[in-house]
Image: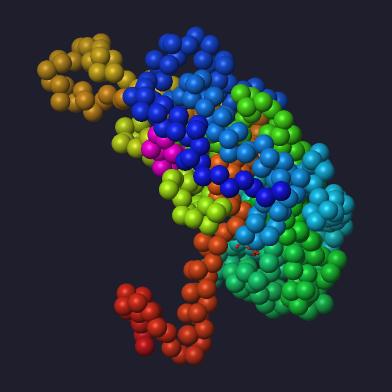
């Protein structure tokens, strides 16, 4: 079943939301709490180890109900079925979008009428056996030593997920050290290779297409480095590949038993659950990797079945649309209160912005409304000492997700209480702000002569009224991380359906690649090619022609 082709701005609920927005641009979140004694409870969702509080928003039940109507009018229910069952909803590439099938068979997904569960199980079994052999030390390098270091060579979707998750789950890591080479900048690979021992290093060349310039250049450099110490026959025990392009992996000299297949229905930016996550499984062990998948599967089920009021991804997506399309927000901040999630927003930047940064709708026409929002963030409390000033007192509306955990992993409760006191204080401060009267009272309490601070007082006033969502999760585990990432993935899907765009292609990244290849081809012929005056001037400075 193809996705529906509705122009959302023509829907009844969209028009209704436009009317509401005039009212809510003037509303105060604190006043909304005064008007509804049950607001905190009724606008929070408790699910498994998650407590998600959506009450500190510039919305009320009428707005939420209209947003639920928007989802319905947009055909979300049919789209959801098409997505989870394996219909080719990535129509511009003619592919299904089945990252959910990597973690659950609950929706019996089929591609071209064929169930995918068997191929998923086969690759999982291969990952499990490989991980067990490498982690236990049974898999030996060319001099008979066990592996100590894993190098993931990949970029974009073949890098960001594994980087984010291995960092996020560092607490669960075993003795294997993981390294990531992504940038084609030769300094990156050089810095990584500098401290490695070829006898104990395993390289994973991760590329869905196995044609990506950066990855092939880095893999070639790593192979040359390895061969400067070992022989061609030793490559088999030190190189593995993850790809859909099995012909190319063979040409690169990777033994067939070391090639992990991935299906074309796994999008790069949604592929950490597939064999692309091999570095994750190696670093935390296969059981923990399974637990990551199980956590995601539980969120998939929740997303598929929970009613609108209790559906976490649905509320995340709809509030995002409310701010982006009706309240004038252009960006969303994501602030995890754990250092382990330091790469989380970088990961989501790709997932969100590559998926929903599109101005052509599913009818092939230019949209007349905003689509994908800009996502950014850094962990708290560091970010409080960096850019929070602008969220508190800047001129832009920035709805912010706060993600915190009840239990610390290392048990340092004193640190955790300090961290979490900031977590709670920030969302409260962002909502309530600080009035002129409060600032004045503070000066009075200190015995300050008010006439001497009259000019300072306006600068110390905070308007407040800044919307936040609070995710309070019991503990950062592979399982809860899986659920959290899956919630954001479904948010992306829902928003794409409503915006009437194709979320799972990425033609926007192609043009730059083509032009870079043309420049390289020109250079190989000793020319700088033909360009606009600015680019021509820059090229001649670089190549001195
Ligand atoms: C992700 C994108 C992109 C892709 C990289 C790497 O959704 O498609 O980031 O993952 O370009 O591609 P390969 O895995 O094919 O090397």
In the image, is residue 96 above or below residue 68? below
User: What residue sits 62% from the left and 69% below the top?
Assistant: 212
Residue 437 in percent (x, y) is at 25, 14
87 and 120: which is toward the camera: 87
User: What residue sits 43% from the left and 16% below the top?
Assistant: 32
* Boundaries of the magenta span: 324-333
Q: Is residue 81 left or right of residue 341?
A: right
Q: Residue furthest left?
A: 451
In which quadrant is the C terminus drawn? bottom left
Q: Is residue 397 left or right of residue 108?
A: left
Q: Is residue 438 left or right of residue 414?
A: left
Any part of residue 150 in sight: no
Residue 280 in percent (x, y) is at 71, 50
Q: How many marks?
A: 0
User: What residue sits 78% from the left and 69% below the top?
Assistant: 246
Image quarter for residue 410? top right
């Amino acid at each position: 079943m193809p996705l529906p082709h509705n122009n959302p701005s023509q829907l009844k609920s969209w028009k209704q939301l436009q009317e509401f927005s005039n009212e809510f641009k003037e509303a105060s979140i604190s006043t909304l709490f005064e008007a509804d004694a049950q607001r905190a409870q009724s606008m929070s969702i408790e699910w498994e180890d998650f407590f998600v509080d959506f009450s500190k928003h510039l919305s009320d039940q009428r707005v939420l109900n209209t947003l639920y109507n928007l989802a319905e009018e947009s055909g979300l229910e049919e789209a959801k079925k098409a997505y989870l069952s394996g219909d080719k909803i990535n129509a511009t590439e003619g592919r299904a979008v089945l990252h959910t099938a990597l973690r659950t068979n609950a929706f019996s997904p089929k591609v071209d009428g064929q169930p995918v569960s068997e191929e998923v199980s086969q690759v999982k079994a291969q990952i499990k056996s490989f991980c067990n052999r490498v982690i236990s030390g049974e898999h030996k390098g060319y001099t008979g030593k066990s592996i100590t270091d894993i190098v993931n060579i990949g970029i974009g979707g073949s890098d960001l997920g594994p980087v984010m998750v291995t960092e996020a789950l560092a607490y669960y890591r075993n003795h294997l050290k993981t390294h990531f080479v992504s940038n084609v900048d030769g300094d990156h690979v050089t810095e990584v290779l500098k401290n490695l021992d070829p006898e104990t290093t395993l390289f994973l060349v991760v590329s869905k297409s196995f044609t990506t310039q950066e990855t092939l250049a880095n893999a070639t450099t790593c192979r040359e480095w390895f061969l400067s110490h070992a022989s061609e026959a030793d490559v088999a025990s030190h190189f593995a590949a993850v790809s859909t392009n099995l012909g190319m992996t063979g040409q690169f000299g990777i033994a067939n038993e070391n090639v992990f297949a991935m299906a074309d229905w796994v999008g790069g930016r949604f592929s950490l659950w597939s064999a692309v996550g091999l570095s994750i499984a190696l670093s935390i062990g296969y059981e923990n990797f399974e637990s990551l998948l199980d956590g995601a599967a539980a969120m998939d089920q929740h997303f598929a079945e929970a009613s609108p009021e209790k559906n976490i991804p649905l509320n995340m997506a709809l509030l995002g649309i409310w701010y982006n399309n009706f309240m004038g927000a252009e960006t969303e901040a994501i602030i995890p209160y754990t250092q382990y999630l330091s790469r989380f927003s970088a990961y989501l930047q790709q997932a969100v912005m590559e998926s929903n940064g599109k101005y052509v709708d599913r009818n092939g026409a230019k949209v007349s409304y905003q689509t994908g929002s800009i996502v950014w963030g850094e962990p708290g409390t560091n970010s409080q000492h960096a850019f929070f000033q602008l969220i508190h007192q800047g001129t832009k509306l920035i709805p912010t997700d706060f993600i915190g955990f009840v239990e610390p992993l290392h048990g340092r409760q004193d640190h955790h209480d300090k961290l979490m006191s900031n977590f709670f204080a920030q969302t409260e401060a962002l909502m309530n702000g600080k009035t002129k009267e409060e600032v004045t009272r503070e000066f009075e309490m200190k015995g300050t002569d008010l006439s001497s601070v009259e000019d300072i007082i306006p600068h110390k006033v905070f308007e407040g009224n800044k919307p936040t969502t609070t995710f309070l999760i019991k503990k950062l585990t592979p399982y809860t991380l899986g659920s959290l990432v899956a919630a954001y993935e479904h948010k992306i899907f829902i928003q794409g359906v409503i915006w009437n765009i194709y979320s799972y292609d990425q033609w926007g990244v192609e043009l730059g690649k083509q032009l870079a290849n043309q420049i390289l081809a020109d250079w190989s012929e000793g020319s700088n090619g033909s360009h606009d005056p600015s680019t021509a001037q820059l090229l001649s400075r670089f190549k001195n022609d």
